[in-house]
Amino acid sequence: MTRKLRAVWALLSGVLLTVVALTILASRAVDASPLSTDVSGHISADTTWTLANSPYVLTGDVIVDPGVTLTIQAGVVVQGRGGVELQVQGHLQALGTTTQPITFTSETDSGPNEWAGLVFDGGTGHLRAGRARLR
């Protein structure tokens, strides 16, 4: 009987170790996605900011170069640090939906004038009224 108990104990220990290992691997896979995406500098090729990588934190001025399109997917949040601006010299395509608006705000999102904002400097934009929020 002792031999049977040892065999059962060994089997249960193996199952338990497998469950623990799978739990650790699953938690690492979940933690692999970034909490935010930091951006700064020039955008010199057509670029899309995706909901999966949102929020986008402007750590320095971001300039969409002439002839370049920045597309921002529905539901994305763009956060600017103090004094930082998103400057559009090319084209900005920000088409949110009623259920997933695009939000432009400061990193802290606690009041007005916390970042320099969205600036069109010879560029163009397509933003849907009521579906893109500027704070």
Image (spheres, rainbow, N blue to C red):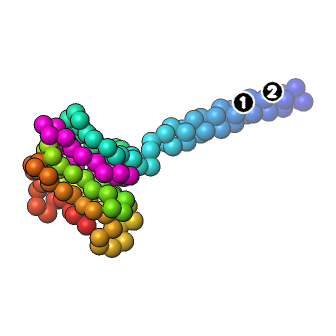
Question: Which residue type does callout 1 highlight?
Answer: Gly
Quadrant in which the N terminus is drawn: top right
Where residue 25 appears, x then y in whole percent?
57, 35
Where residue 81 appears, x then y in whole percent?
37, 59
Which residue is label 1 attached to? 14
Q: Nearer the viewer, residue 118 or 98?
A: 118
- Which residue corresponds to the image point at 59% horizontal and 39% vertical from the top-left? 23
Question: From this viewpoint, which residue is outermost toward the bottom?
Answer: 111
The answer to which quarter of the image holds residue 53 is top left
Question: Which residue type does callout 2 highlight?
Answer: Ala
Q: Earlier in the sequence, mark 1 or mark 2?
A: 2
Main SS type for the magenta part? strand
Q: Nearer the viewer, residue 103 or 119?
A: 119
Q: CA distance from mark 1 to mark 2?
A: 11 Å
In the image, the segment drawn in magenta is 55-77
* Residue 8 seen: no
* Residue 52 seen: yes
Q: Which numbered marker is on residue 41?
A: none
Locate residue 12 relative to residue 33 in the image: left or right. right
Question: From this viewpoint, which residue is outermost toward the right?
Answer: 2
Which residue is label 2 attached to? 7
Q: Is residue 103 above or below residue 68?
A: below
